[in-house]
Image (cartoon, grey):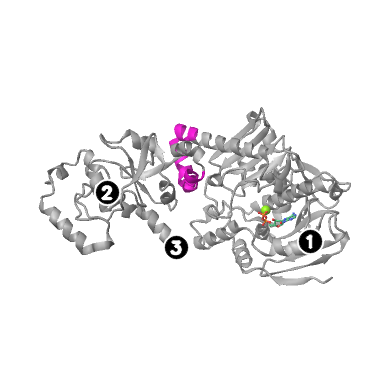
C-alpha cells in the first residue's frame, strides 16, 4: 500500500503509555538515554550484518548518532545511520511490548499506584515509549540499510499510531530519525547545554560517537567520542562512569552492587566489564531469560544471546570483548565455539571468586546481593556440580539460630553439637510455619541448629545429596534423625521421663489402626512437646520435595 494506516496499540502498550504520561518518573530525562541506546543498538546491528554484507555500509561506514535541536519549533530529533526499520518492523517493535521484562515492570507499576514505590519503579528503563514522557507527538522515519524505501510511524501516544511509506527524501540516507514534538513543559530539552550535559553524563560511553546540531543549519559538534569504556585502563575510570555504563548496558537506573572489570591475557585475550545489579530485574525468574552479557569481538557488537554466563548467574549484566574470536562468527556457531566455552568458564570463575571475596570483606553488601539473587544462585547447586563446593560457600540461610544475620555453612559447621553428624534442614513455604513445626522440637531441645529453607528451589538441590566439609545434608522430616546420640541441653526436656513400656503396646495399636497408610510407627527422640508428627522414611524423599513433585503431576 502507499497509504498511511492507523492502528491501535496492543492493550499493554496503551496502558504503559498512559502511565508514562501520568508519569511516575521523577526523572524524565531518561528518555534521551533510552533513545540514544536504541540508536547505538541499531548501529551495532548494522555493523554486525555488514560483516557478511559489506555493501550495506555503502560509502558511509562509520556509525554515528546525531541530535538535532530546534527550539523555535520545539523539536528534538535523534538520528542514527544504523540498520533502520521497515513498516512491518515498526509495527512489531513500536506497537507491541516484546520485552517480557517490560510487561512485569507494568504490573509492578500498576501495583505501585501513584506513590510509595515510585522511586523503585524509576530504577527501570522502559525503552522507546519513554519518549512520550516529554513529547506530545513522536514521529519515526526510517530507511533500512540497503533499501530504496522509507517508512514513517507516528503517534500522539493516545491509543493509536499510524504507519506507512514515506518519501525517500524525508528519511535519513540510512537508518532512523526519531522526531520528538516536545510538550510545552519539556521545551528545555532543546537547550544545547542541557543536551550536552545529559549525553556526557548518561550516554558518554556508548560505543558510537554522538554529535549535536544546536539549531537548524548549525554545524554538527561532537559531544561524545564513542570510545568504549571497557577499553580504558581501570585506573582512569571514575565510579560514576562505571555507573553510567552499567545503566546503559543493563537498562536499569539503580546503582550496581558490584563492578567486575578485568582483562584476561595469555592463551585467550578478552575484556570483561560486568555488574551485579543493585536491585532485582523484573524478569529474573522468566524461564526464557538466559544470560544478559553482550558479546563483542574487537569492539564490534556480535550478540547478547551468547550465554556468556551460566543460567544461575543470569542477573549479571555487562559485556565481554574478545580479541580472538573471528569477526564473522555467526550467531548459530557461537554455541559450539571452544574459545567461547573458555570465556564462559573464565567469566563464571571470576564472578564467583569476586562474590566470595565480597562475602569476606563486606558481609552486609554481600547480604544484599544474596537477598536479591540468592534464589537464582542456588540453582547452580544442582546445575553446576563442578562448582558445587564453591557455590556452597556462597550460600546463606536463615535458621533456628536467633538473629537476623544470614548463616553460612561454615557458621553452621562451627556451631555443630557434640555427636552431631549431619547438617539439618527443613523446607517449606513459610518461615514462621517452619519455626513452629513439631519436627523441630527434638532439635531445639538439644540446641541443634536447623536451616529453614523457604525458596522453592531448596527442595531440588537438597534432594541431590550434597555434602559440605564431609557433612551430609539431612532433612528433619527424614527418618529417625540420629538425635539420640546428641545430649539434651534443654533443662526441662532433660527431666522428661523415658518412654514407659506401655508405649510399645500403644504403637502397635496405632500401626494396626492406620494399616497401609503408614510404613512405620515409632517412639522418637525428636518430640519434646507435641504427641506425634509425620516423618518420611530414612530412604524416601523429603516431604516438601514430594509435595512439589505431586504438584508438578509426577
Ligand atoms: P529494546 O531496545 O530493549 O529492544 P525499546 O523499547 O527501546 O526496547 O525498542 C524497541 C525496539 O524498537 C527495538 O528492539 C528495535 O527493534 C526498535 N528500534 C527502536 N529504536 C530503533 C532505531 N533507532 N533503529 C532501529 N530500530 C529501533
Ligand atoms: Mg532500547
Quarter occupied by the N terminus: bottom right
Quick check: marks 1 and 3 in contact, CB under 8 Å?
no
* Residue at x-position 63% and y-position 54%: 28
Badge 3 marks a residue whose secondary structure is loop
Secondary structure predominantly adopted by residues drawn in magenta? helix
Does residue 544 appear to the left or right of 80 in the view shown? left
The residue beneath circle 1 is 86
Q: Estimate how packed mark 1 is, as few (under 14), some (14 to 19) or many (20 or more) residues with alpha carbons within 10 Å.
A: many
Give the x, y percent position of residue 410: 38, 35
| Label 3 C-beta lies within 8 Å of the nearest ligand 1 atom | no
Does residue 186 appear to the left or right of 22 in the view shown? right
Is 120 situated above or below 295? below
Q: Which residues are magenta?
A: 356-383
Q: Estimate how packed mark 3 is, as few (under 14), some (14 to 19) or many (20 or more) residues with alpha carbons within 10 Å.
A: few
Res 461 seen here: yes
- The disc placed on residue 553 is 3
The residue beneath circle 2 is 440
Is 8 situated above or below 426? below
Amino acid at each position: 500500500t502507499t497509504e498511511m494506516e492507523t492502528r491501535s496499540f496492543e492493550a499493554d502498550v496503551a496502558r504503559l503509555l498512559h502511565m508514562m504520561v501520568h508519569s511516575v518518573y521523577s526523572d524524565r530525562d531518561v528518555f534521551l538515554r533510552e533513545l540514544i541506546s536504541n540508536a547505538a543498538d541499531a548501529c551495532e546491528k548494522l555493523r554486525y550484518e555488514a560483516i557478511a554484507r559489506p555493501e550495506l555500509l555503502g560509502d558511509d561506514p562509520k556509525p554515528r548518532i546525531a541530535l538535532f535541536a530546534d527550539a523555535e519549533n520545539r523539536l528534538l530529533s535523534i538520528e542514527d545511520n544504523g540498520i533502520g526499520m521497515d513498516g512491518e518492523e515498526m509495527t512489531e517493535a513500536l506497537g507491541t511490548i516484546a520485552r517480557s521484562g517490560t510487561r512485569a515492570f507494568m504490573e509492578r507499576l500498576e501495583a505501585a499506584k501513584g506513590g510509595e514505590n515510585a522511586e523503585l519503579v524509576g530504577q527501570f528503563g522502559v525503552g522507546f515509549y519513554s519518549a512520550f514522557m516529554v513529547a506530545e507527538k513522536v514521529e519515526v522515519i526510517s530507511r533500512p540499510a540497503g533499501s530504496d524505501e522509507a517508512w514513517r510511524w507516528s503517534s500522539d501516544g493516545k491509543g493509536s499510531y499510524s504507519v506507512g511509506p514515506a518519501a525517500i527524501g524525508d528519511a535519513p540516507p540510512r537508518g532512523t530519525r526519531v522526531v520528538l514534538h516536545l510538550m510545552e513543559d519539556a521545551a528545555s530539552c532543546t537547550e544545547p547545554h542541557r543536551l550536552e550535559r545529559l549525553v556526557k553524563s548518561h550516554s558518554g560511553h556508548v560505543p558510537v560517537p554522538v554529535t549535536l546540531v544546536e539549531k537548524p543549519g548549525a554545524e554538527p559538534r561532537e559531544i561524545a567520542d564513542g570510545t568504549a569504556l571497557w577499553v580504558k585502563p581501570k585506573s582512569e575510570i571514575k565510579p560514576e562512569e562505571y555507573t553510567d555504563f552499567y545503566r546503559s548496558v543493563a537498562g536499569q537506573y539503580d546503582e550496581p552492587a558490584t563492578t567486575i572489570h578485568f582483562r584476561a591475557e595469555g592463551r585467550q585475550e578478552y575484556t570483561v566489564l560486568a555488574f551485579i545489579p543493585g536491585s532485582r530485574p523484573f524478569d529474573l525468574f522468566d524461564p526464557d531469560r538466559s544470560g544478559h552479557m553482550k558479546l563483542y569481538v574487537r569492539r564490534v557488537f556480535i550478540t547478547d544471546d551468547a550465554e556468556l554466563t551460566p543460567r544461575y548467574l543470569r542477573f549479571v549484566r555487562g559485556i565481554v570483548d574478545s580479541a580472538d574470536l573471528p569477526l564473522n562468527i555467526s550467531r548459530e556457531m557461537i554455541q559450539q565455539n571452544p574459545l567461547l566455552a573458555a570465556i564462559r568458564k573464565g567469566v563464571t570463575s571470576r564472578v564467583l571468586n569476586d562474590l566470595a571475596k565480597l562475602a569476606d570483606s563486606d558481609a552486609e553488601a554481600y547480604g544484599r546481593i544474596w537477598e536479591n539473587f540468592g534464589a537464582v544462585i542456588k540453582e547452580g547447586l544442582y546445575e553446576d556440580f563442578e562448582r558445587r563446593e564453591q557455590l556452597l560457600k556462597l550460600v546463606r540461610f536463615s535458621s533456628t539460630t536467633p538473629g537476623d544475620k544470614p548463616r553460612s555453612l561454615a557458621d553452621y559447621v562451627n556451631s555443630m553439637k557434640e555427636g552431631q553428624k549431619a547438617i539439618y534442614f527443613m523446607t517449606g513455604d513459610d518461615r514462621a510455619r517452619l519455626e513452629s513445626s513439631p519436627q523441630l522440637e527434638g532439635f531445639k531441645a538439644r540446641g541443634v541448629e536447623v536451616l529453614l529453607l523457604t525458596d522453592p528451589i531448596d527442595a531440588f538441590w537438597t534432594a541431590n545429596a550434597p555434602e559440605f566439609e564431609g557433612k551430609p545434608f539431612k532433612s528433619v522430616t527424614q527418618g529417625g534423625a540420629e538425635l539420640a546420640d546428641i545430649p539434651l541441653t534443654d533443662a526441662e526436656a532433660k527431666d522428661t521421663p523415658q518412654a514407659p513400656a506401655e508405649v510399645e503396646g500403644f504403637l502397635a495399636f496405632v500401626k494396626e489402626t492406620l494399616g497401609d497408610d503408614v510404613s512405620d510407627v515409632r517412639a522418637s527422640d525428636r518430640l519434646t512437646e507435641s504427641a506425634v508428627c509425620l516423618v518420611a522414611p530414612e530412604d524416601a524423599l523429603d516431604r516438601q520435595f514430594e509435595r512439589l513433585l505431586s504438584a508438578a503431576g509426577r
